[in-house]
Amino acid sequence: MLISSTKIRVLIPHHKLVVENGKSFTVYCIEVVCDGKVTNVERRYSEFYELYKKLSKMMDAKISFPPKRILNNKDIKLLEARKKGLELYLQTVLYTFQDDVPERLLEFLAIPNYYDEHFEERMNEDMDGSVDDENVMYQSAMNTQYNMICFRKDAYLVPTLKELEEEAILPDIVMRGCLDGIYKK
């Protein structure tokens, strides 16, 4: 998979109780931000644990994972602690796989496959130099999916005091520039 973890941010803002076939269980609502698109995914603890087991085989370092305890689905403190632990686990895994995020993790986070194998096959077929309209349209479509909105800072971080001060003087700078442009020669 050719996607960097620096393009992915994950948060688990809340969890909820789900009742299915008379049984209740907790799902953790994951907010995934990837390339400027926000996706919400719901996963059970057992799904997180399966991911943990599969990724542990791929990693050299051991990443802490919230322990599997028998939980009462109504114990808010334990659920909150587990939610924070699962969020920290996902963020640590993404940091560990900085250059190449495993496909299993992308599937877990419901991030679409950004690398289209068919594109590479078609490029190999057309290496003889012939250019057809369909191939040009396909290549331009492939190029457009990589456009990305970039932000100067992480949208989920609290601004520092220096950043707040800089933002406070920005309107003055803009106003002064406009007035200088209109009235000064």
Image (spheres, grey):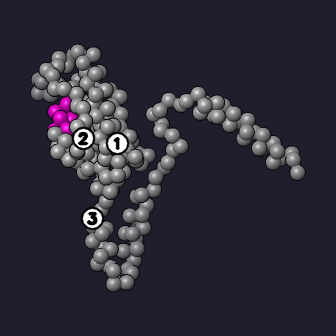
Say whether residue 47 is visible: no
The numbered mark at residue 61 is 2
Residue that label 3 marks: 117
Q: Which image quarter: residue 138?
A: bottom left
Q: Is residue 130 above or below residue 112?
A: below
Tell me which segment is drawn in magenta. 43-52
Q: Residues within 10 Å of mark 1 (few under 14, many from 20)?
A: some
Residue that label 1 marks: 95
In front of the other: label 3 or label 1? 1
Percent position of residue 9, x then y: 38, 40
Whichever of labels 3 and 2 marks the residue nearer the N terminus, that label is: 2
* Residue 51 belongs to the span the image colors magenta: yes
SS for tag 2?
A: loop
Q: Is residue 99 above or below residue 9?
A: below
Provide the major secondary structure of the magenta segment: helix
Whichever of labels 3 and 1 marks the residue nearer the N terminus, that label is: 1
Question: What residue sits 32% from the left and 57% below the top?
Answer: 2
Question: What residue sits 32% from the left and 74% below the top?
Answer: 123
Q: Residues within 10 Å of mark 3 (few under 14, many from 20)?
A: few
